[in-house]
Each structure stands twice: as structure tokens, then as C-alpha cells.
Image (cartoon, rainbow, N blue to C red):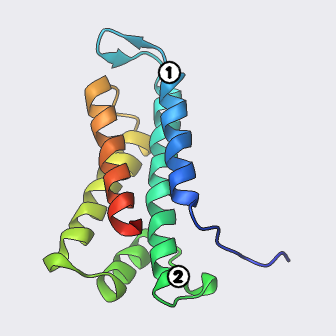
Amino acid sequence: MPKQTHVPGEAFRYMENAKELLKAASIEGNAYIDKKPVREAFGTAYLAVLEAINETLIKKGLTVKQLPKSVDAYRAALQKHLYVNNGKLLRSFEILYDSLHIAGYYRGLLRNVSTVKDEIKAAEDFIKKLLN
């Protein structure tokens, strides 16, 4: 079995991939016509958020094997290792989970151009806050 590794900077790479997916999506009026690339962009942006958390946890001393493997484990890790500013980081994660993963990717509910771009920007801001 190959050794599990973590590649620093993956979160930013994933975010760029998400943006590229959106650039290729057709827009009519103020809505994306085809929701498939939009859903893929949301899924990729959510993975970028998880990669940023992983990278931050590794910097805090966790090993790749100790990284969270479920959303509940990510919540617990944020509370245990990254709980700052009275829980603002955890609240931000919860909002991103709901918007990116559930509404955007899983259910495919978000297609308004400005809403989609705002959510992608929120993910990018979260990542920058963690990694910069």
C-alpha cells in the first residue's frame, strides 16, 4: 500500500481548479445553465477547505494518519486544535459545509452567478485565513 502523504499548497491548487470549472460553465442572464460544472466546482472548493484544515493540523503536529476522516471529526479537530476567536473558525467551517458541500455540491441548489461566486470567495478567504 502506498504511503499516505500530504502536499503543502494543495488547498490553493484545488481552489484554482474550482475557479477553472466555473469559467468553463455557461451563463445565461444571472444563472449558470448547466449545474454539473457548478456542482463540481463546489465539491472541489469544499475539498480545498478540507485540505487547508489538514495542512494546518499537520503544522500543529498531527500526522497524516491522525487527520480527520469525517465531517464530525473535522469539527472535533477544529475545536481541539484550532479553536480561536470564540469559535468563529468553527462557525465559518459550518457555513462552508452547508453552502459548498450540501447546497452547492450534494443538492445542486446554487446556480445564481453572484451567489456561486460569493461562496467560492468565502471558501478562498477561509483558506487564506488558515494558511497565511
Asked if disc 2 and disc 1 are in contact, CB closer than 8 Å, the reply is no
Q: Position of residue 42 (x, y in %)?
A: 44, 42
Residue closer to the observer: 2 or 109:
2
One can see residue 112 in this view: no
The residue identified by callout 1 is 25
Residue closer to the observer: 112 or 24:
24
Look at 40% across and 50% down and name the residue there.
101
Look at 54% across and 32% down and name the residue there.
20
The image shows residue 82, relative to residue 19, as above or below, that is below
Q: Quadrant of residue 105?
A: top left
**Mark 2 or mark 1, whichever is nearer to me:** 2
The number of numbered discs placed on residues in the rendered structure image is 2
One can see residue 61 in this view: yes
Left-right relation of 27 to 51: left
Q: Position of residue 92 (x, y in %)?
A: 25, 62
Look at 45% across and 87% down and name the residue there.
60
Q: Position of residue 24 (x, y in %)?
A: 54, 22
> On the rendered image, what quadrant is the C terminus found in?
bottom left
Look at 41% across and 74% down and name the residue there.
74
The residue identified by callout 2 is 58
Q: Identify the element where label 2 is drawn.
A: helix
Looking at the picture, which amino acid does disc 2 mark? Ile
Left-right relation of 21 to 97: right
Q: Residues within 10 Å of mark 2 (few under 14, many from 20)?
A: some
Looking at the picture, which amino acid does disc 1 mark? Ala
> On the rendered image, what quadrant is the N terminus found in?
bottom right
> Farthest residue toward the top?
29
> Farthest residue toward the right?
1
The image shows residue 67, relative to residue 10, as above or below, that is below
